[in-house]
Image (cartoon, grey):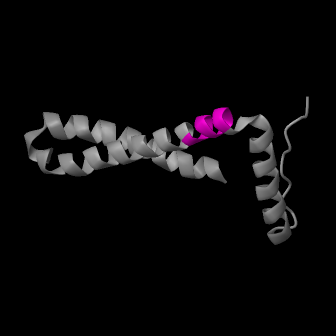
Amino acid sequence: MILPMMGFFLMLIVAGGLGSLVASADPTRARLFPFTLAMLFSGTAVWIIVLGFGALGETALGPAVSSILFFLFCWEHRRSYPGLHCWHPPQP
């Protein structure tokens, strides 16, 4: 479920980067530069926030607390969606 969302933001980075290159090189498309730059920065910011919070949560909270939070999240959604099967990390 999260992969299509992250793919969309990755597409924003790619389209914004290529669009910024085209808009900065071609004077007829220079008016599109602010839009393509906004796409580039918004996609990059989302990836930095998601990966940063993931790394921060794993290091600050530890893997045990992260596993408990993930289990509670899956448990809550399992009641809403009976066919949902959550993966549980192996215990050492």
x%, y% of residue 45?
A: 41, 43
Q: Does the magenta stretch include residue 42?
A: no
Nearest the eye: 59 or 74 = 59
Left or right side of 15 for 47:
right
Left or right side of 11 for 5:
right
Left or right side of 88 for 69:
left
Q: Is residue 59 magenta?
A: yes
The residue sitting at 41% across, 40% down in the picture is 44
Q: In which quarter of the view is residue 1 placed?
A: bottom right
Q: Quadrant of the C terminus?
A: top right
Extreme residue in the front direction: 60
The residue sitting at 87% across, 63% down in the picture is 83
- The dominant secondary structure in magenta is helix
The residue sitting at 34% across, 43% down in the picture is 41
Left or right side of 43 for 87:
right
Extreme residue in the top direction: 92
x%, y% of residue 48?
A: 47, 38
x%, y% of residue 53?
A: 56, 42
Extreme residue in the left direction: 27
Extreme residue in the bottom direction: 80
Q: In which quarter of the view is residue 19 placed?
A: top left
The residue sitting at 31% across, 37% down in the picture is 18
x%, y% of residue 76?
A: 80, 64
Nearest the eye: 51 or 62 = 62
Count of numbered circles in the view: 0
Nearest the eye: 43 or 36 = 43
> What span is colored magenta in the figure?
53-60
